[in-house]
Image (cartoon, helix red, strand yellow):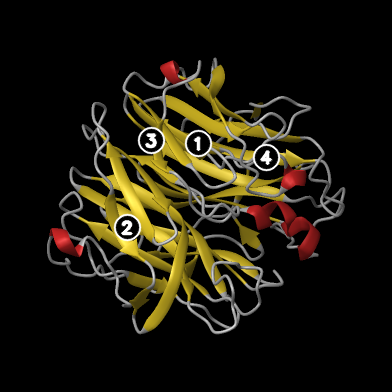
Amino acid sequence: MSRRARRSVIAGALSIAMAAAFGPAARAVPFTRVQSAAEPFSWNPGKSLATATGHLLSAWASDCPPPSGACATETSPTMRVFVQRAAGGTVPAAWGRPIRVSPLGAQAERVSIAADGDLVAVGWVTQRSYLHYDATAPRSFWIRISTDRGRSWRRAHRISMKSGRVDYPRVAVSDGSIAAVWTNADTGEIRMALTTDRGATWSKGTVATTTSRSDGSREGYAGLPDVGMSGDDVAVVWFANPSGMTRAAFSSSGGADLLSGAASTMQIGSSPNDGERYPAAAGSPTEGDPRVAVAFTTNDELIVRIWDGATLGPEIPVASFPSVVGGKAYDGGYGPAVLPVAVDDVLVAFAGCRKRSGVPDPCDPSDPAARIDVLYSETTDGGSSWTPVQRLQGSTKKFRTNDEPSLTTTSGTRRVAFDGYGPAFTRYRVRMRSSR
C-alpha cells in the first residue's frame, strides 16, 4: 500500500502446500480472460469490489480521470475516485460509465467499497496536494452512501478529523450496518466508526493502538487495519508494531463493544511489515452464514482463520513459500483478499512474488527486476481441501506487477480484480477475471 500514497509524486522443496495434509486438492476453477475493471490510469489498494442486489461494483482512483483523460494538476482536473457498475449476471462484466463519487476539487484516493443488498458504502482519503504531496500534511477520510445499489449517492460525510491524518481506511456493510476502520497516523490509534441506521448517525471509538509505521516515518503510524462483518459478527485485524505483529479483535454484538477498546488476539508475533503485506478481513455475504474470515501472511505462509461469532477457528494454511505454480517459482506472497461464501466455501487471492536472481526482495514492486503475479485458490469444505493455486495474471512487459486483489461473487460467479502496473508507474489499470 505504501506506494499508493506516493503515486501522485511519481506518476505525472518447492511445492505449494495447500493444507495437503488435510485432504486432496479440489479441481481448479475456470476463469474468463482478463478484462478491464476501470478506466486507464486507475488503481486501488484492494477491497474495491462489491456486490449489491443484482449488480457488481468496482471502485478505483485515477489521476488521469474520465471523461477527458487529462492528467491531474493542483486545481483541475484532480485525482478522483469513481465507482462503476455492471449487471451481476454479465460474464465478462458489462461495465457502465464511471460515476465520480469524490468532489471535483478534491485530491482523492485510497478507496474502499462494500455493499449488502441495496446498501453501498464507498470510502476514500483526501490530501491537500497532488504534484507536491506532503506526507506530513492532513489527510481526511470520507464516506459516501448509496441506498439504491450504487445508482445514486448521498452527500459525502467526513469520518475523520479535518486536521488529522489517516492511513488506509477499509469499509464493511452487513444487514443495514456500516463499519469503517483506519489508523490515526498522528497517534497510532486504530479507529472505528459504526452506523446502524444507514449513515444517519455514527458512533466512533478506538479499538487499539499501534506503533507500526508500515508506510514510512513521514507518513505517520499505519496499522493497515481491515474490518469484516456478517450480521452481528465483526472482525478487525491490524499490524500492532513495526515487526509486523498481527492482532485481531472480534465481536458478536454488531461491533459496538469494540469502540471503547477491545481484547485482541495475537495472530502472528512477527511478519514482514513494509506497507505491502497487509492483513485482510471479510464477512460472508450469504444469508444465515455468520462467518467472518481474516487472512494474513507470515514469512513463509498465507494463513486464514474463521470467526463464527462464538469461536475463532484454527489456522488454515492456504499456501507456503517457496513454492511453484505453473512452472514458476515463488519466494513469497502478500496483500491477501479473503471471502467466505455459502456455508463452507472460502475464496483467497493474493500477490505471488517470483523468485528471481539478483532480486533481494521479490515482493518489492519498486524493484524494476521484480515480477509479481495474482494467485488464487478456494475451498468448498471449510479448508480440508483447496483447489490448486492458479495464476490469474502473470507479469507482462506492460504490467510487471499485479497485486492488491479484491474479491466478490455475483450469483456464484467469482470476481477477482487487481492492480496492474510497471515499476515506473507509467501505465496502470485495475483489471479483473470472472469464473465461468
Q: Name the residue under label 2.
A: 414
Is any part of residue 52 visible from this angle?
Answer: no
* Disc 3 residue type (three-letter): Asp
Of marks 1 and 4, which one's residue comes earlier in the chain? Answer: 4
Q: Name the residue under label 4.
A: 125
Of marks 1 and 3, which one's residue comes earlier in the chain? Answer: 3
Q: Position of residue 363 (x, y in %)?
A: 54, 67
Q: How far apart are marks 3 and 4 (CA)?
A: 22 Å
* 2 and 4 marks in contact (CB < 8 Å): no
Q: Is residue 427 placed above or below 167 in the rendered structure? A: below
Q: Is residue 149 left or right of residue 251?
A: right
Query: Crowdedness of circle 4 by 10 Å Cα count: few (<14), some, many (20+)?
Result: many
Q: How far apart are marks 1 and 3 (CA)?
A: 12 Å
Q: How many marks?
A: 4
Q: Name the residue under label 3.
A: 116
* Disc 4 residue type (three-letter): Val
Q: Mark 1 points at which residue?
A: 171
Q: How far apart are marks 2 and 4 (CA)?
A: 28 Å
> SS at mark 1?
strand
> SS at mark 3?
strand
Is any part of residue 136 visible from this angle?
Answer: yes
Q: Nearer the viewer, mark 1 or mark 3?
A: 1
Q: Is residue 109 left or right of residue 382?
A: right
Q: Is residue 22 placed above or below 217 in the rendered structure? A: below
Q: Distance between the residues labelled 3 and 2?
A: 16 Å
* Disc 2 residue type (three-letter): Arg
> SS at mark 4?
strand
Determine the residue positioned at 72% across, 31% down: 186
In which quadrant will I find the C terminus? Answer: bottom left
